[in-house]
Amino acid sequence: MLSTGEKKDTVKAMVRTCRLLRRMNQNNPTARRSESLYYEMLDIYYSRLALAREQKQFIAAHTVFFPAEILYAMDLVPMHSEVSTWMTALFLEYQSDMLAAGAELGLTPEICSAHRGLAGAFALQALPRPDVVLWTNLICDNTAKSGELLMKLNDCPGFFLDHPFQNTKIEEKYMINEITEMVRFLETKSGHKMNWDKLSEIISRTNHEINLLHEINELRKAVPSPFYNKDFLPLLTIDYMFPGQPEAIVYLEALRDEMQDMIRQGKGAAPREQYRLMTLFIPPMNLMGFLENLSRDYGAMSVVEPLFTLWKPGQLDPGHPLDSVVQKSFMIPETHNMYGPLGQETLNQIVTSARDYKVDGAVYWAHIGCRHTCAAVKLIKDTLNEIDIPLLTIDCDIIDPTISPESEIREKMERFFELLDDR
């Protein structure tokens, strides 16, 4: 746990941790290059944030699914709010103080811990005070409401980006108007003008990133799986934090090349693959190491996460960067279940993924503060039952490890593996 004097240097502590992990990785002859590159990316991201105030740069805090390409094109310093809370819990184990501070603000356990912890982090000044807060709507009411609280805690202006749930020409035009208005807001508040040429370059790289993600997802169909369980977090956060950034392309190309080499050699990420699992929703941050141990101890591999890593098809056009920002917002994997009601198209995607990736079973991480994903558990379970794929539901919390201790989850997983063995 961080001391009181260190709390205001949380971002610098994260930078030090990423650099330490990178050095450890580089000194390990069996480590993969992609791991080192990911820590380098995090180092770049949080170093820029740590130096922002000293260099008098403009910090724009934003919630999940916000088009950060806009911020990079305007030379603003992005701070992904939820992911920064995740990383603080993952690398610094600072979640208890953040959640306690959130509770003092009146935020109850029924509210998503990522947002409770985020509010607590700002209340403790554990994250830099942003110049603006930017947030957008999901079916998740936690995200839709959190921006107002963050503005109050940081005494700064904000902009709510209203994203329509349907994907029609009318909604696309509406979204373009929303982003155009937001750009004007950012220009006024920051004094930075939008660099449309730079945005086009970023869109071009973002398009390349998405194509690389498609390639990686195809490679994950191989048996045995060449994808390590712990690579789920980088794959999830690559677009959250690094859209259109050159270092993201370097990382994804390295990961793809490593997977291709493993497939050519007939090697898998586990010593002996035994169970091919579908992961539904995000595993708790404190279990990232545990999930890797599952691959070593039981041969349990997460081979697909249809709701969070499978991008919808489409190509972005750098010649029309604003249109591309809108198009991409309808391509992100989370639109399967977070933009509007969960429909038959999403259920069909889950079934197709189970078959394409030769899944033996599925694990649903049911976060107690996430009402809309928990509400979908039975619907998804019934759908998987129709194709004889068992589903294990684990009640948990994305940040708070006290909700479901690792020992308890290990016991549930072991029983689930026994069930799979008996089939």
Image: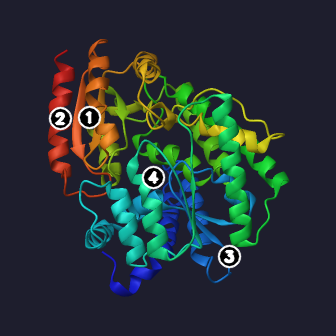
Q: Amino acid at mark 4?
A: Ala
Q: Residues within 10 Å of mark 3 (few under 14, many from 20)?
A: some
Mark 4–mark 2 contact, CB under 8 Å? no
Mark 2–mark 1 contact, CB under 8 Å? yes
Q: Earlier in the sequence, mark 3 or mark 4?
A: 3
Q: Amino acid at mark 2?
A: Glu
Q: Earlier in the sequence, mark 4 or mark 1?
A: 4
According to the picture, the residue beneath numbered tag 1 turns out to be 298
Q: Residue 8 at x, y = what percent?
A: 44, 81
Q: Amino acid at mark 3?
A: Gln
From this view, report whether residue 155 is shown above or below residue 284. Answer: below
According to the picture, the residue beneath numbered tag 2 turns out to be 414
Q: Tell which tag, 1 or 3, sits nearer the viewer.
A: 3
Q: Earlier in the sequence, mark 2 or mark 1?
A: 1
Q: Is residue 87 left or right of residue 111?
A: right
From this view, report whether residue 271 is shown above or below residue 103. Answer: above
Q: Tell which tag, 2 or 1, sits nearer the viewer.
A: 2
Color theme of the render: rainbow
Q: CA distance from mark 4 to mark 2?
A: 38 Å
Could you say whether the residue bearing mark 1 is in a helix, strand or loop?
A: helix
Quadrant hosting residue 145 = bottom left
